[in-house]
Image (tube, helix red, strand yellow):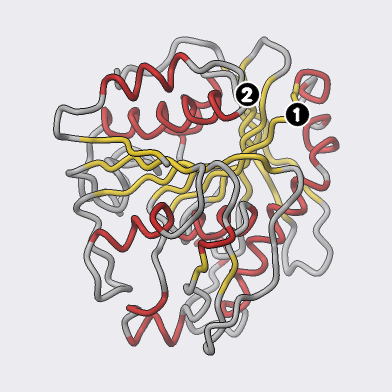
Amino acid sequence: MSSRHPARPIVSVKPIAVPSPGRDSDLQVKVTAPLVGHHLPVLVFSHGNAWSMDGYEPLVDRWAAAGFIVVQPTHLDSRRNGITWDDPRFATIWRVRIADLHAILDGLGAVLRQAGDLGTRADRDRVAVVGHSWGAQTAGALLGTRVLDADGTPGEDLSHPAVSAGALIAATGTGDSLTPFAAEHLPFMRPDYSTMTAPTLVIAGGRDQSQLSTRGPEWFTDAYHLSPAPKSMLAIAEGEHTLGGVAGEAVAETTDEDPARVALVADAIAAFLLDAFKLDSAPWTTLNTGAGDGTWSITSK
């Protein structure tokens, strides 16, 4: 995979307001899309903790250049909102995040119309959700994942009927190995992947050692191993939590900066979704054929 930025012209529109009753602040999104083209699939992306609609450009630009309309919300936990761990609102942000994605999908027509002519250029029958880190848990809920309570009882089904495929980047594993800090502040980090039935690509780094779990990097493979088929997993041997810098080049959180690794993540998700949507199977086939050099691998079920 080449790390060179794709040459296909793209355009971004922001901010677009999305009606979201009961939210402390307005839900705003950024829309990025190819400058030309019709029947474009839609990808709704959920950012990691503290980020915003203005992050993850290395991923979003490649997805748009590959033919996707990408919608990025700014969730309440964005650092621009100043909500800390100790804020009483923090305990419910995981639910607000999921509600944000529902609001976008429920109002997708209006969002696309505010982004120029995308209302007539989108394929509303092909919608995916993708997320990184906390965003992966958010996206996973719309793909069918439920949250277990303290007694191990699955919570409500928060999936969305418009979503037919997705991808989870560095998605947290089961909640039985949370550290005391995580158990206290992040009790919702107890996913039940057994109900995540939608076709999903799981991306995990072989050097992603979370401070929230007592387990090693294999914690981030639970979303693949504990969910029903059809699923695929891209395992990147040297990848840490930012997989080379998915949120942006040289950002503070990036401890394993590698533009080629970020391009691999972006292109693998685009290829998987194009195949899942039955639009173009060639990129996914090519990617699977190219695996095997020891730096990354793909498994499927």
- 221 in relation to 269, above or below: below
Q: Which mark is residue 115?
A: 1
Q: Residue furthest left?
A: 294
Identify residue for label 2: 33
Q: Secondary structure at mark 1?
A: loop
Q: Position of residue 13 (x, y in %)?
A: 67, 30
Quadrant (top left/top right/bottom left/bottom right) for the N terminus: top left
Task: List x then y, in percent, for residue 34.
Answer: 61, 17
The reply to whether dot 1 and dot 2 touch (C-beta < 8 Å) is yes
Q: Residue at x 69, y 41 (%)?
A: 15
Of residues 12 and 98, the one drawn nearer to the viewer in this rendering? 98
240 w.r.t. 277: above or below: below
Residue shown at the point (15%, 27%) measured from the top left:
293
Which of pointers 1 and 2 lies earlier in the amino acid sequence? 2
Give the residue at x 75% y 29%: 115
Query: Residue 296 falls in which quadrant of the image?
Result: top left
Measuring from the top left, give residue 199's x and y in whole percent: 55, 41
Where is residue 110 drawn, in percent x and y?
85, 37
